[in-house]
Image (cartoon, rainbow, N blue to C red):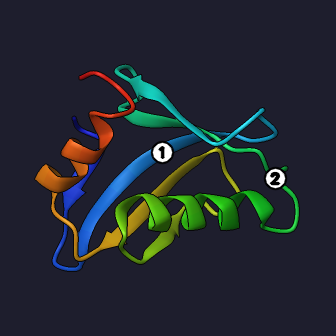
Amino acid sequence: MQAVQTTPQGITVMIEVSPKSDKFQIAGYNEWRKTLEVKLKSPPTKGKANKELMKEFSSLTGHETDIVAGHKSRQKTILIYDMDEEDFHKLLENFIKF
């Protein structure tokens, strides 16, 4: 999956978000855009969607998460500290098929 890259701090994940959805959900992988598609409940106002994204991925992975690019865009890059690609792929297998 080209959306995930290893860095010295952990991994970065390219994400495309859809705010104001029914629930938080990792909906799939967009082959064309090379992004992980994520649905968020929160609206994209006052940083609510960004906070939900960081909270959900921190909870899902058990690692601290930050948005490193795309704070005001639907296309975002998050950094998941102290995690490797293999562990992240194992977590994602519960949500999507590669």
Mark 2 or mark 1, which is nearer the start of the sequence? 1
Q: Where does residue 12 sit, x and y in percent of width and height?
A: 32, 60
Which is more toward the observer, 34 or 81? 81
Q: Amino acid at mark 2?
A: Pro
Q: Amino acid at mark 1?
A: Ile
- Image point (51%, 64%), residue name: 69
Q: Residues within 10 Å of mark 2 (few under 14, many from 20)?
A: some
The residue at which mark 2 appears reads as 44
Name the mark on residue 15.
1
Q: Are marks 1 and 2 in contact (CB under 8 Å)?
A: no
Please give left or right for residue 89 compared with residue 37 in the image.
left
User: Looking at the image, which residue sits at the far left?
Assistant: 86
Secondary structure under tag 2 reads loop
16 over 49 or under it: above or below: above
Secondary structure under tag 1 reads strand
Q: Where does residue 40 sit, x and y in percent of width and height?
A: 69, 44
35 over 79 or under it: above or below: above
Name the mark on residue 64.
none
In the rendered image, the quadrant that contains the N terminus is top left
Splitting the image into 4 quarters, where does residue 62 fall?
bottom left
Q: Where does residue 53 sit, x and y in percent of width and height?
A: 60, 58
- Image point (35%, 32%), residue name: 34
- Image point (68%, 68%), residue name: 51
Total numbered labels placed on residues in the image: 2
Please give left or right for residue 39 compared with residue 64 in the image.
right
Which is more toward the observer, 92 or 46? 92
Please give left or right for residue 24 compared with residue 37 in the image.
right
Q: Where does residue 55 sit, x and y in percent of width and height?
A: 58, 67
Which is more toward the observer, 20 or 56? 56
In the rendered image, the quadrant that contains the C terminus is top left
